[in-house]
Image (spheres, grey):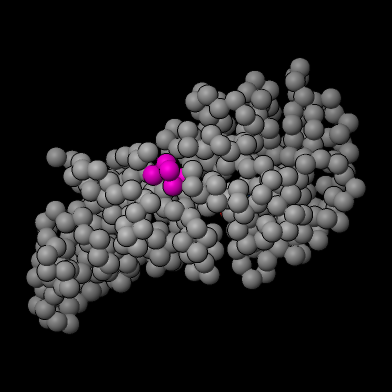
Amino acid sequence: MPRPIVATLDLNALRHNLAQVRAAAPDALVWAVVKANAYGHGIERVLQALRGADGIALLDLAEAQLVRQLGWRGPILLLEGVFEARDLELCSRLSLWHVVHCQAQIDMLALHKTQQAHRIFLKLNTGMNRLGFAPQAFRTAWTRLNALPQVDEISLMSHFADADGDKGIAAAMAAFAQTTHDLSGQRSLCNSAAILRHAKDLNVRADWVRPGIALYGASPDFPAHSAADWGLQPVMSLNTQIIATQNLQPGDALGYGATFVAERAMRIGVAACGYADGYPRLAPTGTPVSVDGVRTRTLGRVSMDMLTVDLSDLPEAGLGSQVTLWGLPQSVRGGPGQPVSNVMAQAQGIPIDEVAHAAGTVGYELMCALAARVPVQIQE
Ligand SMILES: *Cc1c(COP(=O)(O)O)cnc(C)c1O
C-alpha cells in the first residue's frame, strides 16, 4: 500500500469560484491566472474547469505551450512578457498576448520579423516598483509601440501593491487614471484582492480582471476575510491517515528538538504528512488539523514525512483515522469523497489560510509547494 496521503482537487469548487469572481466583477472579462502550474494544482488537471474563463494568464512559455496543446484556443497572456528575443517567435506561432514592461522588450519587438502583429499589455508601475514603466516613460513607450508594425492593439495594465491591505488602491488608481486618461485601449488592473474588495467601482474592474488565488478557493486577504467570507470553496484538500499512536506521560517530549513537552497524560497520533509533502515545517504547535472530521491541533515539530497531532479528546481515533491537513475531509481509503456542497463537511474543513497563517505565510505558498510525491485525485 502506498503512503495514505492524497491531495484531492474539486473541479466543481473551481467552477464555483470562477462564478463568484464573475459576480464580483460583472461584465469584466476574466483572465484565469494559472502561473506556477496553476498555483500547484496542475494545469492539465484544472484547465477543463476553467473553460468558462475568457483568457488564460501565466508567465512560463512552456506552460503557454502546454495550454495550447491542451486545446485552449482563446487568448493567453504572458504576465511578464518575453525574456529574450526568440520568445517572440513562439508568441507569433501560438498567438500569445504579452505584457511589455520595459524598454528592452520594445527593442526586441522592433526587431522581430512576423506576419502577425502582436497583442500587447503595456504595464504601468503604480507604486509596486517591480515591473512596469514610470508614468512619463509609459506614455513614450505607448507612442513607440503604437508606431511599430509588429504591434496590434495595445491594452493598458497595472498591478496593485496593496489591494489586500489597508493602504488600498486609491493612489495607484489616481496614478493610472492620470497617466492613461487620453490613451485608447482595454484596461486591466485587478488581482483577486482587488476584485473582491474594490471591483464594485467600474473603473477598478475595468475591461479585464486577473484572478488567481480566489479561483483556487483561498482568501487573498486572510485574516481580514476568510475564503468562506468571500463565498469561495477550497479546490485542494490534503488528507492522510494516522499511522501510529503514542501515550505521553507528564514530562514526555515529542519529536525533533523536544519542542513540545506534555504537561499531563495525553494521547497523540502520528500522521503521514511532513514537509517533504509540502506541509510547512514552520507550522507551530497548535496549528489546526482535523481527525475524523473533528478539529484538533498539531504538536511539536513537523518532520520530513510525519507530523504529530493531539488525540487527547478523540478517544475513538486511532490507526487509519483520517487526518485533514487542509481543505475538506475525504475518504482516503478509496471510498467516495464527500461532496463539497455538503455544508457539514465544509464546516469540518481546515481552511488552508489558517494553516498558512499559523506558519507565517499565505495560502498561495502552501498550494504552490504541494510536493510532486503526493498523489492527486480529481473530483468532478
Ligand atoms: C499572480 C498575478 C495575478 C493574480 O494574483 P492573485 O492574488 O492570485 O489573484 C494577477 N496579476 C498579475 C500581474 C499577477 O502576477
Question: Which residue appears at 33% of the width and 48% of the height?
Answer: 339
Q: Position of residue 247 (x, y in %)?
A: 9, 70
Quarter of the rendering containing residue 306: bottom left
Question: Which residue appears at 25% of the width and 61% of the height?
Answer: 293
Q: Position of residue 323 (x, y in %)?
A: 24, 57
Does residue 83 show up? no
Query: Is 38 displayed left or right of 128 in the figure?
Result: left
Instruction: Give above or below for 335 relative to 267.
Output: above
Q: Position of residue 60 (x, y in %)?
A: 56, 36
Does residue 112 show up? yes
Instruction: Give above or below for 61 relative to 35.
Output: above
Question: Which residue appears at 37% of the width and 44% of the height?
Answer: 9
Magenta span of residues: 10-14
Instruction: Give above or below for 166 relative to 341.
Output: below
Query: Is 61 displayed left or right of 115 in the figure?
Result: left
Quarter of the rendering containing residue 351: bottom left
Question: Which residue appears at 54% of the width and 63% of the height?
Answer: 221
Q: Main secondary structure of the magenta part?
A: helix
Task: Check if residue 118 falls in the magenta segment.
Answer: no
Task: Check if residue 13 falls in the magenta segment.
Answer: yes
